Image (spheres, coloured by chain):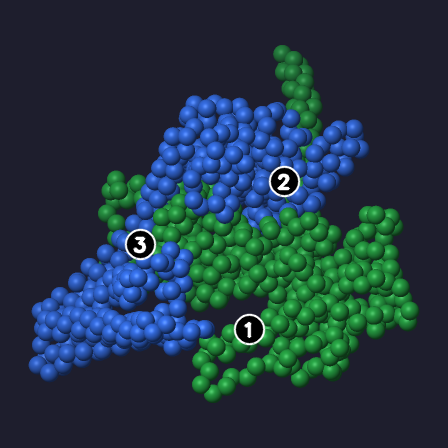
Amino acid sequence: MSDTTFASAAERRKLVRAGLARRHLTERLFRGFGVLAIVLALGFVALLFTDVLRKGIPAFTQSNLHLAVTYDPELLKVDPAPVQAAGQSDADIRAALLAWERKVAMLNWNTVIEAALRKAAPEGFEIDSRQILTIAETDARHRVRQLFVENPDLLGQTVEVEVLASANADNWVKGNINRDLGDAQQQLSAPARALIDFFVENGTITQGFAWSLFTNVDSRSAPASAGLLGALMGTFWMMLIVIILAVPLGVGSAIYLEEFAPKSRLTDIIEVNINNLAAVPSIVFGLLGAAVFINWFRLPLSAPLAGGLVLTLMTLPTIIIATRAALKGVSPALRQAALGMGASKTQMVFHHVLPVTFPSILTATIIGVAQAMGETAPLLLIGMNAFVASVPATPIDQATALPVQIFLWQGNENRNFFEPRTSAAILVLLAFMITLNAIAIFLRSRLEKRA
Amino acid sequence: MNTFIVAALLLGLLALAYQLGWSKSRALATSGGTRVHSRSQYHGALVALWALIPAVLILAIWAFFSPGVTRWYAVSQIPTDVLTSLDQIGLNQQLQRIRDLASGFGVTGDVQPYEQAAGENLARFQLLSFLIMIAAAAGLGVLGLWFAQRRINPRLRARNEVEHAISWALIACSAIAIFTTLGIVASLVTEAFRFFTYINPLDFFFGTVWAPKFSSTGTGDAGQYGLLPLLAGTLMISAIAMLVAVPIGLMTAIYLNQYAHRSVRKVVKPIIEVLAGIPTIVYGFFALVTVGPFLRDFGASIGLSISATSALTAGLVMGVMIIPFISSLSDDILNQVPTALRDGAYGLGATQSETIRNVLLPAALPGIVGAFLLAVSRAIGETMIVVLAAGNAPILRGNPLEPVSTITVSIVNQLTGDTDFTGPQSLVAFALGLTLFIMTLCLNIVALYIVRRFREQYE
């Protein structure tokens, strides 16, 4: 009897041992899957950032062309600029100045640029004028002309001017385009390419930080000078509107719902409604903006005002939910102490509860603003994808936004040049996001420690 | 300039009213030693409210009506014979000239005598109406101020009245959220109904061909608007995204929640959450220039033809975007499962993975399903990744390696920069938006309900 028990016990132990090996294997496998998942997730983060960095960083340097430009009176036949005479009205002198500037603009400034380029080229270098002009960006002539309009005394003088090399020249210098491709597939002619290589060697073309990325507005005719200034200002106006409107409205709404609202059917519906709004796709907010703000209220199309309002409505639920959570977390002792000292409910909320929740509200606001900043889809529907080559001076001027500018640039035909530019714009956007989030984290830890 | 005057006026009125109310209340409290119901600040605030609200109302009315009235006056200054000879554009130019004369900037060319007179009259009229408005606003403000500060006596319940005003302001804030939803529903439904006057709803919801003919705008031929190709594309991409995001997100959450050391968790969790903060346009660009070409080359190397922009490209990248969403929601939910359940399983000799698979996950299942549904709703409504990487080919087919199109892509294509909403070509965006809104709304309501029930179960 005891023998059989012993035998069966040994049997069972063997069984368990065998099972245990299998079970430990599954355990290790399961753990392995977990590690694999984390490695994959982290790998995606790393891949995304290295990819954008690798593509974007070269675009922060750009080829500059140093030219000695001569304002040759032979080439530039123009009258002196008009001066305001006594008794002439403001409108009249402006008209006269405009007429003069128009005359200046009608001059063929390309001849000036061409002469400067030829002077820098080796003696007797054979290249026709159309080809040599492809080396400088098309806005070089505007820059040279602008210098003259600002200072008409330059006529007859020679000045050192730094202009941008064209996008194609920049591609060639940086090797963005395959140098071994045949003439038919190259954007630049063979003499122009040879001349660019010569310019790089003798220092006429140098690489410098691409300030144009931050100081210029978007440009189609002169891709090398296309910059983000307009988009940055558009984004700035929209974020200003979002902060001014969304924070007081969101915090006020949260205070009412959490502290004052009677528990009723209605407040239940509002609560469900806000949770749903937080999960409504952003493009639906764009449709709302197109139908209500643009079509019904007749707000100007492509203006940061309409965009800012749409983004405000999108950000509100985020701020409301976060503020309510913060209010919920305030200790009842604080409330009871305030009420016990004879404070009214409003005094209790505004003097005692709200200051404690300040760090959370601030963090929620910053995160909400960062989210709104990266939003693209709703802005496309209210016309902010229009090509705008000016800096919006007010929130009702035409403008575009940083993410929309990224969308527009990625679709540009000059891929060799605009793929790095787009990546650079993405890096600027990500830098803003990371800065905002870092500020949020820093402020939270600082303020919470103090509280 | 005018704006600054108005703002300065309002600020001055505010300060004056507050100061008067405050000092009167102060005098009451200190002189006779009487007990005043409210503190001086509340008296000040009450008087300020009484002074400011009428003034702001007047200004708002003026801001609303003044452009119309000014224009009407300017038009009335143009002689009738000139007026009849002008068309709409000419009239606007004429008005601009008069305005330029009135502002003192002047115009180019010869100035007609009537223009000169009209400009001077307009300048006078603008000045006069501005002064009247200022006087009315200030007068009414002062009247309100006088009335309110006369009311101040020790028994005035100023605090209660101010708090009442505050609570109304707070209610107005909460109403915004309701109005947003109402605005979304109203605008989508009205415009979608206008679309359905052009196109039979049955053709829309059950049509298998998507061919909105832009070139035929204005002619009778409206094109075909079948939803099914777009719906199929949307669901296919969402399914691929879920196949990527759910296993990775869930396993990440489980590992970080159950296995990982606290220091590992502290580093890894924020890094993964970085993925959630990246704007979708960045993912779209990444999909378009990196993932798409990689998949195409990879497919070519194993003899498979994969388009650079396809449902697979968009779905994969969207899956990456959703990973942090799933992992942080699941993490929260796993945290809420009582430790007693876990300890019980350990006590019976279960290994860690057996505990997780047989005890923890079944207990957390409802919450995880809720998180899954929320993630699906987000995938369906995602726009920029699919706009850039899905290839925009609204054809009904089941191959994920080919380009597809989705509901959101079509909304963007049909509506960018177009606002007159005259034909079905642009109105269809609202019908699509309505479909999208209802789909995500149902998913959200169900998901939020499940998650809420789950929380209550263990509370």
Q: Is residue B187 left or right of residue A1?
A: left
Residue A291 drawn above or below residue A345: above
Label 1 neighbourhood size at 10 Å, few (<14), some (14-19), many (20+)?
few
State whether residue A9 appears in this view: yes
The residue identified by callout 2 is B389
Residue at 54 percent across and 36 percent down: it is: B215
Q: Earlier in the sequence, mark 2 or mark 3?
A: 3
The residues bearing labels 2 and 3 have C-alpha atoms spaced at a distance of 39 Å
**Chain with green colouring:** A
Q: Where on the picture, by quarter, is residue B130?
A: bottom left
Q: Which disc is residue B173 wearing?
A: 3
Q: Nearer the viewer, mark 2 or mark 1?
A: 1
How would you rate the neighbour count of disc 3 (Cα within 10 Å): few for under 14, some for 14-19, many for 20 or more?
A: many
Mark 2 vs mark 1: same chain? Answer: no
Work out whether residue B428 or residue A74 is closer to the camera in this orientation and state it.
A74
How crowded is the residue under tag 2: few (<14 C-alpha within 10 Å), some, or many (20+)?
Answer: many
Chain under disc 1: A
CA distance separating discs 1 and 3? 50 Å
Q: Is residue A351 visible?
A: no
- Label 3 secondary element: helix
Left or right of A15 on screen, residue A136: right
The dot on residue A98 is: 1
Rendered blue, the chain in question is: B
